[in-house]
Amino acid sequence: MIEQKSAGVVVYYLKDGQPIFLLLKYPSYWGFSKGLIEQGEDEKQAAIRELEEEVGIKVENFISGFEEKQTLFFKFKGEFIRKQVVLFLARVTEQQANSTKISWEHEEFVWLNLDDAISRTRIKANKELLKKAYEFITEYEKQRKLF
C-alpha cells in the first residue's frame, strides 16, 4: 500500500455574519483545496501553496486552534493508497472570494452556506468537517468581537 500525506484548507468568508464555504469539484466529489506535501514543505506551507495554485487565493496565516485530520483509502492505477490529510481553516475577504479562479485540477467551484455545503458534499467526513468548522468559526468570531 502506498502512503501519502496531504495538506489543505477549509476556506470561508463572512456574509451578513455567516460563514460561506468554498467547495471544489473533483471528478467524483466536492471537497476542499488540498494536495500532496512536497519535499522541504511543512503541512501549513503545503496548504498555503495548494490554495494559491488551485484557486488563486493567497493566505498568510490560518486561524489558530483549528486542525483536523482525515485518513482516506482509495485505489489509483491499480495501487491501493492510504492518504493522510491535515486541514486548516482560513478566513478570506469577500473580495478574495469573488476573485476565485480554479486551476485545471478542478471542474468548478462554489461558495455556499453551511447547509448548502453539507448538501453538496457526499463524503461523510467532509460533512462532519464542515460542521466542526462552522462551530469553531462561530466561537472564534464571537471572541473576536469581544476584543
Image (cartoon, rainbow, N blue to C red):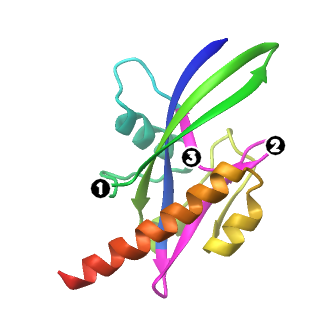
Tell me the element at label 3: strand
The nearer-to-camera label among 1 and 3 is 1
What is the x, y in percent for residue 101?
Answer: 59, 54
Q: In the orientation shown, which residue stands out farthest toward the left? A: 147
Residue pictured at 41% horizontal, 43% vertical: 48
Q: Residues within 10 Å of mark 2 (few under 14, many from 20)?
A: few
The nearer-to-camera label among 2 and 1 is 1
Q: Which residue is mark 3?
A: 33
Looking at the rendered structure, the kind of residue marked 3 is Ser
Q: Residues within 10 Å of mark 1 (few under 14, many from 20)?
A: few
Q: Which residue is mark 1?
A: 64
The image quarter containing residue 147 is bottom left
Q: What stretch of residues is rendered in magenta?
A: 14-35
Residue pictured at 34% horizontal, 71% vertical: 140
Q: Earlier in the sequence, mark 2 or mark 1?
A: 2
Looking at the rendered structure, the kind of residue marked 1 is Ser
Q: Earlier in the sequence, mark 3 or mark 2?
A: 2
